[in-house]
Amino acid sequence: MKDFYTVDDIALILRVTTRTVRNYLKDGSLKGRKIGGGWRFTEDDFMKFLSSAGIVEKIKDDTKQDVIDFLDGLNTDMSGEIQICTIIDVYRSVKAVEELRNALMRLTDAHGKYHFSFTYTEAEGRARFTLFGTVEYIAQAMEIINKLQ
């Protein structure tokens, strides 16, 4: 996990433009610190932002559209002969899910162009991860998830 996230990092994770991230800063829904002329966000800043109801619904809607686009062959941000989209539901404690989310974020940071989305439904105690990537990326993600067993 990174010590700090940038506007570009947040935009990549959320699959939105940097302009949208700056709008979240402007309207106060995302908090951060300006360091050396650029915005920096701690993991705590980012998690508080993700906890707001409107953001969670937007992420869910965007993820649904990403899956539909993948099924329709419109996944233009990935390359390779084999491309995978997988949805994983994990019924675990918040702490276990946070550890898994952090591990998947580190993996995604290391791979760069692949992505995943994450939502947690507290009433159901369910985390839903939707991953998009190559065989190698998905295999490594599954190894991480398998360690929960």
Image: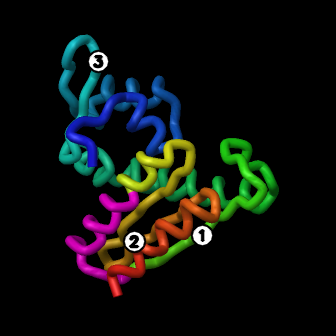
Residue 93 counted in the magenta span? yes
The residue type indicated by label 1 comes to Thr
Disc 1: which residue: 86
Numbered disc 1: secondary structure = strand
Label 3 – label 1 distance at C-alpha: 34 Å
Residue 49 drawn above or below residue 21 = below
Classified by dominant secondary structure, the portion drawn in magenta counts as helix
Q: Position of residue 3 (x, y in %)?
A: 21, 40
Residue at the right extreme?
A: 72
In this rendered view, identify the residue nearer to me: 91 or 62: 91
Q: Sequence order check: which comes first, mark 2 or mark 1?
A: 1
Q: In the image, is 143 to the left or to the right of 31?
A: right
Q: Position of residue 132 (x, y in %)?
A: 60, 58
Residue 1 counted in the magenta span? no
From which residue to which does the magenta span run? 91-104
Rendered image: mark on residue 38:
3
Residue 4 drawn above or below residue 93 = above
Residue beneath the point at 53% across and 64% down: 130
Rendered image: mark on residue 148:
none
Could you say which quadrant of the image residue 35 lies in? Answer: top left
In this rendered view, identify the residue nearer to me: 10 or 133: 133
